[in-house]
Image: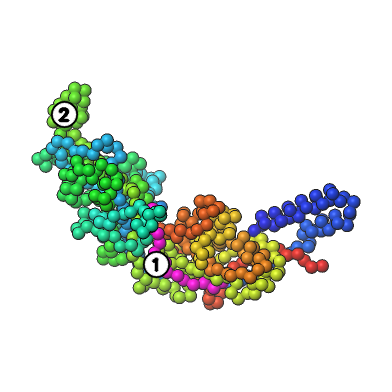
């Protein structure tokens, strides 16, 4: 890159100044120092190298403790079908000093509430209610999928049972056990207007004494799913005084969590939602009788000190502990654009491997003594492909050793690029990834080099190293977007994948 040239010339210039100070009378040597930085003695050129590419299906990825959890069913003719579900532990209510229910308790409702990632629009509805759009959705939002919620029967260990010195890793293809019957089952599609819950409150005789209108603090929409009340009554209320609720460890062995599952209905061309479950929870709404003190008005009727008044309560059980995604892939119908294209998709989809300099004499290139100013991998999007879910960024790494390339460590993740570039009409056009330091180190090496394959994948936040010593690629991947690229086939013409090397060399006189 150009900064390398500046650094090299800076050192040459500094050397010349010091040398001149010591031997100012030696005019001939001084002239040599000046001529070294004379631009007329350098020329800049470009070398284009062919790249050998291969598609690789990703069988599984680490799926627990990730940034986003997918839910839904999606298929297109380029990347096949993915069904995305997830499992999660739930924690004990944080606000309760003691988990206990009182006199004449009625279970009013139990709701699983998962906030959408949504953007509030500038325009409101006519009645003043806010409008939202749902973020991070791909597919046909008008086509429903089947949503099921089960009791999770697999215990989620924090530590690896085979090696207790390491944290447990759950992969996206793991099969989890679930209860014999669903706590909820119904058709589902995203709803940006799902901003309100209506909770009926019951007397002991099952008559309704009030209905609450409940909104999120930010007024935003969320997935709201009612669970089987008989099950919750038995497991959470009737047994509330038991030791199972004394600690999270006791509770997580007693109730192991929820399995939130997506299945296709009439069509598998439905949609996927990406969810941040950090604010998700299961809420138990209940009512009970209480006696007021002389200064209390628990039912807000203006009368103090009443006996046996009906009071509303709720317990919030937050999603927490361990959560893990479950991806089911089917490639029966895929790769419509042909085997000569590259298919890069996240969420246990596919990646591309690259082999560099297979048609070049690497020893000769090393002997050229080029000063590499920039080196780029260029990938062009096949704009005729049927899929339209191109990710905003691709990432390159050492595929053979599963390590970061040199540039990520020396220049930072932002310097290597990889962002999607669009054409004048706003359509996905190409990706350019800088690997200048990697190529520079490779070509300045005078020893024989064992070339490694590079991998190109959809970028995830976990691909950014936390420190200069964080060189291992963890292979987390929860972004389901994918792109069809032109490969190395000659039929692709100018759009075939290529490695461009810009270099400076000393002209011979």
In the picture shown, does residue 240 fall above or below 474? Answer: above
Left or right: residue 140 compared with residue 500: left
In the picture shown, does residue 76 fall above or below 21? Answer: below
SS state under label 2? loop
User: How far is disc 1 from disc 2 in space, using C-alphas?
Assistant: 60 Å
Q: Residue at x 15, y 34 (%)?
A: 289
The part of the image, by quadrant, that contains residue 411 is bottom right
SS state under label 1? loop
Q: Residue at x 76, y 64 (%)?
A: 506
Q: Nearer the viewer, residue 371 or 224?
A: 371
Nearest to the eye among marks 1 and 2: give it: 1
Magenta region: which residues?
51-66
Q: Which mark is residue 59?
A: 1
* Mark 1 surroundings: few (<14), some (14-19) or many (≥20) residues within 10 A: some
Residue 215, given in percent of the width and then of the height, sits at 29, 42
Q: Considering the image in quadrants, where does the C terminus appear?
A: bottom right
Pointer 2 residue: 291
Residue 415, given in percent of the width and then of the height, sits at 57, 55
């Amino acid at each position: 890159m150009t900064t390398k040239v500046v650094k090299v010339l800076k050192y040459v210039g500094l050397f010349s100044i010091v040398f001149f100070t010591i031997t100012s009378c030696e005019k001939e040597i001084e002239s040599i120092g000046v001529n070294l930085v004379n631009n007329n003695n350098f020329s800049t050129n470009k070398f284009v190298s062919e790249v050998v590419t291969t598609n690789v299906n990703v069988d599984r990825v680490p799926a627990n403790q990730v940034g986003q959890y997918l839910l839904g069913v999606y298929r297109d003719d380029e990347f096949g079908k993915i069904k995305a579900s997830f499992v999660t532990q739930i924690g004990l209510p944080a606000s309760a000093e003691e988990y206990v229910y009182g006199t004449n308790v009625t279970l009013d409702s139990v709701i699983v509430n998962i906030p959408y990632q949504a953007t509030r629009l500038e325009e409101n509805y006519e009645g003043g209610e806010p409008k939202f759009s749902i973020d991070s959705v791909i597919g046909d939002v008008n086509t429903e999928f089947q949503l099921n919620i089960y009791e999770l029967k697999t215990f989620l260990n924090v530590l690896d049972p085979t090696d207790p010195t390491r944290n447990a890793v759950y992969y996206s293809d793991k099969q989890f056990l679930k209860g014999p019957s669903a706590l909820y089952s119904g058709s589902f599609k995203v709803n940006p207007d799902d901003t309100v819950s209506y909770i009926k409150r019951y007397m002991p005789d099952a008559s309704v004494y009030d209905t609450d209108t409940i909104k999120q603090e930010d007024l935003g929409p969320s997935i709201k799913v009612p669970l089987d009340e008989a099950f919750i009554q038995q497991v959470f209320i009737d047994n509330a005084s038991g030791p199972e609720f004394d600690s999270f460890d006791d509770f997580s062995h007693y109730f192991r969590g929820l399995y939130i599952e997506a299945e296709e209905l009439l069509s598998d061309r439905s949609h996927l939602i990406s969810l941040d479950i950090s604010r998700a929870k299961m809420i138990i709404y209940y009512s009970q009788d209480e006696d007021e003190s002389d200064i209390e008005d628990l039912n807000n009727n203006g009368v103090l000190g009443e006996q046996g008044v009906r009071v509303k309560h709720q317990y919030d059980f937050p999603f927490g502990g361990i959560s893990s995604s479950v991806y089911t892939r089917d490639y029966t119908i895929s790769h419509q654009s042909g085997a000569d294209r590259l298919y890069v998709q996240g969420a246990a989809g596919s990646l591309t491997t690259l082999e560099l300099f297979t048609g070049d004499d690497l020893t000769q290139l090393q002997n050229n003594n080029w000063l590499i100013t920039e080196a780029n991998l260029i990938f062009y999007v096949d704009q005729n492909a049927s899929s339209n879910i191109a990710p905003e960024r691709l990432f390159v790494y050492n595929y053979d050793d599963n390590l970061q390339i040199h540039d990520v460590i020396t220049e930072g993740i932002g310097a290597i690029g990889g962002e999607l570039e669009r054409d004048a009409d706003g359509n996905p056009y190409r990706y350019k990834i800088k690997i200048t330091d990697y190529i520079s180190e490779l070509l300045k090496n005078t020893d024989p080099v064992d070339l490694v394959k590079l991998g190109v994948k959809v970028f995830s936040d976990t691909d950014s190293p936390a420190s200069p010593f964080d060189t291992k690629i963890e292979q987390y991947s929860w972004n389901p977007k994918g792109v069809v690229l032109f490969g190395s086939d000659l039929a692709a013409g100018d759009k075939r994948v290529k490695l461009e090397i810009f270099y400076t060399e000393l002209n011979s006189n």
